[in-house]
C-alpha cells in the first residue's frame, strides 16, 4: 500500500501567518520580523495512496489569530521517501494567508511518518494583505496520511 502523507503543515503555515498580525494594526513598514507558532489537525479528502489532492482541517495559533480553517493542496512523490509540494490557505476572522511549501521524510509502513520542510508566505487578504515571509514545518501521520498533526513556525518579514 502506498503511503500518502499530506502536508497538513502548510495549512498550519497559513494560519500561523494570520496569527502574526497584531489586532488593529496595518501592514508593517519596517524591517522588523514577527514569529508565530501554530498547530493544525487535518483530514485527507482522498483515499490513501493518492499522490495529488487536498486536506482540510482546523488550526490553532496564539493571539490575535486564535482558531482558523485550513486547506492544503498537495502533490507527492512516494518511494522509500515522501516528497511533497503544494499550496495552503488559512482563513481567520481578520483575513487569510497563502503559503507554498516543500517537505520530505522517510516512508514507514509500520509506524508514524514524519516529514519536515520549509514554507514561503506568498500573500494574504484583509489585515494580512501583502504578507511575506518564510517558515519551518513538521507533520506527523499515524495512519499513512489519512490524518495529520502539524506544527509550524513562521517568520513574517512583511505584514
Image: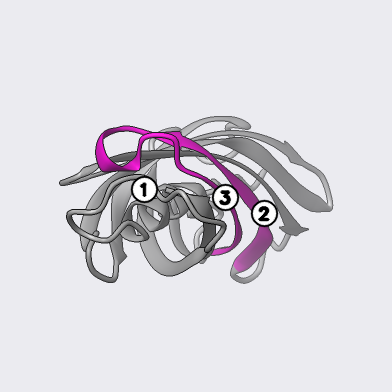
Nearest to the observer: residue 48 or residue 115: 115
C-alpha span from label 1 to label 2: 21 Å
Q: Earlier in the sequence, mark 1 or mark 2?
A: 1
Q: Residue at x 31, y 48 (%)?
A: 57
* Element at label 2: strand
Q: Which residues are magenta?
A: 113-140
Q: Residue at x 43, y 68 (%)?
A: 36
Numbered label attached to residue 133: 3
Magenta-drawn stretch contains 71? no
- Mark 1 vs mark 2: in front: 2
Where does residue 155 sit, x and y in percent of width and height?
A: 54, 61
Report the number of discs: 3
Numbered label attached to residue 61: none
Mark 1, residue position = 43
Quadrant (top left, top right, bottom left, bottom right) of the N terminus: top right
Q: Earlier in the sequence, mark 3 or mark 1?
A: 1
Magenta-drawn stretch contains 135? yes
Q: Are marks 3 and 2 in contact (CB under 8 Å)?
A: no
In the rendered view, does 153 fall on the left or right side of 17? right
**Residue 72 can be seen in this image:** no
Question: Mostly what secondary structure, the magenta segment?
Answer: strand
Numbered label attached to residue 118: 2
Amino acid at each position: 500500500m502506498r503511503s500518502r502523507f499530506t502536508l497538513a503543515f502548510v495549512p498550519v503555515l497559513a494560519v500561523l501567518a494570520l496569527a502574526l498580525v497584531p489586532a488593529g494594526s496595518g501592514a508593517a513598514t519596517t524591517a522588523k520580523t514577527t514569529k508565530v507558532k501554530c498547530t493544525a489537525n487535518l483530514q485527507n479528502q482522498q483515499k490513501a495512496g493518492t499522490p495529488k489532492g487536498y486536506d482540510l482541517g482546523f488550526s490553532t495559533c496564539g493571539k490575535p489569530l486564535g482558531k482558523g480553517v485550513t486547506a492544503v493542496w498537495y502533490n507527492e512523490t512516494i518511494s522509500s521517501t515522501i516528497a511533497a509540494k503544494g499550496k495552503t490557505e488559512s482563513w481567520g476572522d481578520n483575513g487569510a494567508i497563502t503559503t507554498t511549501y516543500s517537505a520530505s521524510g522517510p516512508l514507514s509502513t509500520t509506524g508514524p511518518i514524519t516529514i519536515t520542510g520549509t514554507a514561503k508566505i506568498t500573500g494574504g487578504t484583509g489585515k494580512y494583505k501583502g504578507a511575506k515571509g518564510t517558515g519551518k514545518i513538521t507533520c506527523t501521520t499515524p495512519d499513512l496520511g489519512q490524518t495529520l498533526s502539524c506544527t509550524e513556525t513562521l517568520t513574517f518579514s512583511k505584514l
